[in-house]
């Protein structure tokens, strides 16, 4: 395990007091190592889990050449350019019940979707393309079909002996279905990552407490919990921790004993007259950053015991933005995912002028929608204050205004990160 000092020395131009947002993930990737333990999990419970080993296909899918349509299977070598083809059906092949007979020239087999292609036949004409040719025969009009049409090949989805999924893949519904399609009742995955979180600040109220002047209800524990649950982490909520050394020390010690990662919110800004930073410094190897970004400038990162620490700012939008941009990729890495990239950036035309100072990355909350020209357009949700949590509810994405970028005029293209399903 590298110390923060060693990591810092590896990075060009590292300045904790003016850290470009683009450098944060490089630092965190060096700080975080994937959990090592693996477990065998039933296929039914694989959603969201991360494969520890390749899943090698024990069978080919589909196992046989089969028909992609309801129609008639025949030997496509009989098709002649510019000529119709007349065929005599001699039997029926059903899905799950193959046709065993032999088929001579001028004959065909009625076949259903998914049925095994009878021996020697390689082409299927869909039912609706055929004409009744009398005497129980069908006719295929000229020029509508090529040899091999509407036949699915054995193994075209997955080949026996080849990896169907790779170690490091995070399994979505399609991947879980794929494991099942191979007949596999289990897969080997990394254990779940356990993350504990708490809020700090004497002005923070827990639900159930009466309102008090100058105090606000804790929303960060709820958003953080949801964000973690979407990632499939195990979560442990340590509540709101009072701004006093004994309470903070107890919380950090318990968190470090129980979890792979600790997420706190509040108490990391400059000039913060509290004990949170002091306790982080005392108990762990922690760096305090000023990131060149908005929202979310202050952030603490490091290790307390064997746990990775993410000390997020207190403002509710800053919490979500720093989570999405930095914590989420780091947690994906901790989970053993090979793809830790944030959601991809898309281009959208701005419906508004946006004010932006070069020298920091800004994440404005936007509403992204299809534009009349077939592209995308985006407008902001209005007030971009870092405490305006409703902007994250109204928005469906972040307008990412990059470090060197300046003002945006109406109609300019900007990058947007749609966070549907993630945030
Ligand atoms: P801080 O980073 O501690 O200076 O907090 C910045 C702002 O975020 C202050 O207005 C806090 O009241 C607010 N804040 C801090 N923690 C929370 C929380 N858990 N839930 C909602 N707002 C918070
Ligand atoms: Mg505070």
Image (cartoon, rainbow, N blue to C red):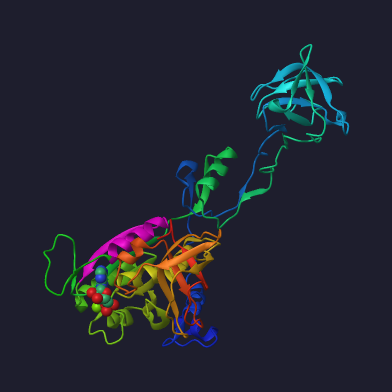
| Along the viewing direction, whichever of 387 and 307 lies nearer the viewer | 387
Residue shown at 76% from the left, 35% from the top:
149
Quarter holding the C terminus? bottom left
Q: Does the magenta run of residues contain 227? A: yes
Q: Is residue 346 left or right of residue 215?
A: right
**Residue 183 sits in quarter:** top right
Q: Does any portion of residue 258 appear in the rendered image?
A: no
**Residue 128 sits in quarter:** top right
| Along the viewing direction, whichever of 149 and 336 lies nearer the viewer | 149
Question: Which span is picked out in magenta?
Answer: 220-241
Q: Is residue 55 left or right of residue 213?
A: right
Q: Is residue 109 left or right of residue 244?
A: right
Q: Is residue 116 above or below residue 11?
A: above
Number of marks in picture? 0
Residue 346 image position (x, y, % from top left): 53, 65
Q: Is residue 355 above or below residue 416?
A: below
Residue 116 image position (x, y, % from top left): 70, 28
Residue 54 image position (x, y, % from top left): 60, 52
Residue shown at 41% from the left, 55% from the top:
232
Q: Does any portion of residue 126 appear in the rendered image?
A: yes
Residue shown at 84% from the left, 25% from the top:
85
| Along the viewing direction, whichever of 394 and 122 lies nearer the viewer | 394
Q: Does the magenta run of residues contain 385? A: no
Residue shown at 12% from the left, 66% from the top:
211
Residue 104 image position (x, y, % from top left): 85, 19
Ligand 1, what quadrant? bottom left
Q: Is residue 167 above or below residue 82?
A: below
């Amino acid at each position: 395990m590298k110390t923060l000092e060693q990591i810092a020395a590896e990075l060009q131009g590292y300045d904790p007091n003016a850290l470009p947002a683009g450098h944060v993930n490089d630092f965190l990737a060096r700080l975080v190592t994937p959990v090592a333990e693996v477990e065998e999990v039933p296929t039914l419970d694989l959603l969201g889990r991360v494969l520890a080993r390749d899943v090698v296909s024990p069978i080919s899918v589909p196992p046989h050449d089969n028909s992609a349509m309801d129609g008639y299977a025949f030997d496509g070598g009989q098709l002649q350019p510019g000529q119709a083809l007349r065929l005599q059906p001699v039997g029926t092949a059903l899905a799950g019940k193959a046709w065993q007979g032999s088929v001579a020239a001028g004959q065909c087999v009625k076949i259903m979707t998914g049925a095994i292609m009878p021996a020697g036949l390689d082409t299927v004409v869909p039912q609706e393309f055929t004409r009744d040719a009398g005497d129980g025969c069908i006719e295929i009009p000229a020029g509508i079909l090529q040899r091999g049409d509407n036949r699915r090949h054995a193994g075209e989805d997955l080949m026996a002996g080849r990896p169907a999924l790779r170690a490091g893949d995070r399994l979505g519904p399609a991947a879980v279905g794929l494991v099942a399609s191979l007949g596999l009742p289990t897969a080997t995955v990394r254990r779940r990552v356990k993350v504990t979180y708490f809020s700090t600040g004497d002005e923070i109220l827990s639900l159930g407490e009466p309102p008090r002047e100058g105090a606000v209800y804790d929303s960060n524990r709820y958003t953080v919990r949801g964000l973690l649950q979407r990632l499939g982490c195990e979560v442990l909520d340590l509540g709101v921790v009072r701004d006093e050394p004994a309470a903070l020390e107890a919380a950090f010690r318990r968190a470090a004993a129980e979890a792979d990662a600790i997420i706190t919110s509040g108490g990391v800004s400059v000039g913060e007259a509290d004990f949170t930073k002091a306790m982080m410094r005392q108990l762990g190897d922690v760096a305090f950053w000023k990131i060149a970004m908005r929202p979310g400038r202050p952030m603490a990162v490091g290790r307390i015991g064997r746990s990775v620490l993410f000390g997020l700012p207190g403002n509710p939008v800053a919490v979500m933005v720093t989570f999405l941009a930095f914590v989420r990729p780091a947690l994906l890495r901790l989970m053993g995912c090979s793809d830790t990239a944030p959601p991809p950036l898309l281009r959208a035309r701005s419906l508004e002028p946006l004010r932006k100072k070069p020298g920091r990355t800004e994440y404005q909350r936007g509403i992204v929608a299809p534009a009349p020209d077939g592209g995308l357009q985006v407008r902001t949700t209005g007030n971009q204050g870092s405490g305006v949590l409703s902007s994250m509810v109204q928005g469906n994405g972040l307008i990412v205004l990059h470090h060197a970028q300046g003002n945006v005029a109406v109609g300019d293209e900007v990058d947007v990160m749609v966070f549907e399903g993630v945030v």
